[in-house]
Image: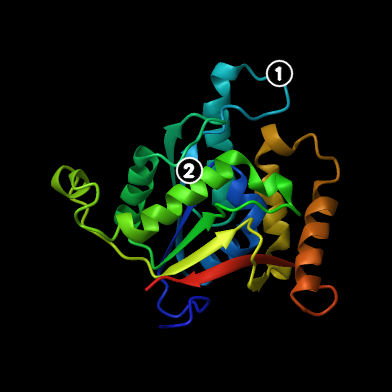
């Protein structure tokens, strides 16, 4: 089995997540590195983040606002394919419909690598273990294995939409308790900050956003044994036969 951390042969990556900004907090620097190397990255988000925000934006306007913010943030990182599935924010469950939505995205994008959220609790980082994150992670894993690769799962995806089965063999997991692969994002850190500043409804209240993100990335680098002064994001990487 090839090394699932190696970029050799990786042409397309698909990010499956619950909310706008989830992958930018966890993986924006890594995504920037991928796109800089010529890898095409796509996002598929279960919700539009309509339950988020910290200001007086009318609730009826929040979904469209957060979709626009996510597209702007993604563009900073070189990502121009962003899909929203329209599930209710704050009420996400790993249903067959969510699995089907993620499977559709896998079959459409045909990625070699899929980045998902962890379906596990991380008691040291409770914020990463939001119920929607875990539900998205469980459904995304089921979409990677076995749904998207099984021609008899969600047969209407082929019959009605012309999307044949697709197997992704590299699974990267963000926000979980079992990280085993650091990515040095030192040179991409400023773009990570810029991407998160694009999520104004979520981050405008953080006067020390740069300092907070730098602290997280510095801690990840130190834990990974990178040289002093480097910044990192960390993932659990799994080879899927």
Figure quadrant of residue 112: bottom left
Is residue 84 at least partly visible in the picture?
yes
State the image coordinates of residue 237 (x, y, percent, origin top left).
54, 70
Picture colour scheme: rainbow
Query: Which type of secondary structure does the marked residue at label 1 adopt?
Result: loop
Image position of 48 with respect to 43: above or below: above
Dot label at residue 222: none
Classify the position of the C terminus by image quarter: bottom left
Figure quadrant of residue 223: bottom right
Q: Which residue is mark 1?
A: 56
State the image coordinates of residue 204 (x, y, percent, origin top left).
76, 35
Residue at 19 percent of width and 48 percent of height: 155
Distance from Cα at disc 1 to Cα at disc 2: 24 Å
Residue at 38 percent of width and 59 percent of height: 144
Query: Which type of secondary structure does the marked residue at label 2 adopt?
Result: strand
237 or 49, nearer to the observer: 237
Residue at 84 percent of width and 73 percent of height: 229
């Amino acid at each position: 089995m090839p090394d699932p951390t190696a970029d050799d042969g990786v042409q397309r990556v698909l990010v499956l997540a619950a909310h706008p900004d989830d992958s930018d907090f966890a993986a924006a620097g890594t995504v920037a590195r991928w796109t800089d190397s010529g890898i095409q990255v796509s996002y598929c988000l279960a919700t539009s983040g309509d339950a988020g925000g910290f200001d007086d934006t009318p609730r009826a306007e929040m979904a469209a606002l957060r979709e626009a913010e996510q597209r702007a943030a993604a563009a900073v990182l070189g990502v121009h394919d962003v899909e929203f599935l329209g599930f209710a924010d704050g009420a996400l469950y790993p249903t067959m419909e969510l699995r089907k939505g993620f499977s559709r995205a896998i079959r459409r994008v045909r990625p070699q690598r899929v980045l998902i959220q962890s379906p596990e609790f991380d008691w040291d980082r409770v914020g990463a273990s939001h119920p929607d994150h875990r539900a998205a992670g469980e459904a995304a894993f089921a979409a990677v294995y076995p749904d998207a690769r099984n021609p008899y799962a969600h047969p209407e995806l082929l019959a009605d939409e012309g999307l044949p089965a697709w197997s992704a063999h590299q699974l990267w997991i963000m926000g979980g308790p079992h990280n085993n692969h650091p990515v040095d994002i030192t040179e991409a850190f400023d773009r990570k900050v810029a991407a998160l500043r694009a999520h104004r409804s979520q981050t405008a209240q953080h006067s020390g956003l740069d300092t907070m993100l730098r602290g997280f990335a510095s801690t990840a680098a130190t834990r990974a044994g990178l040289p002093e002064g480097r910044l990192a994001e960390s993932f659990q990487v799994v080879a899927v036969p």
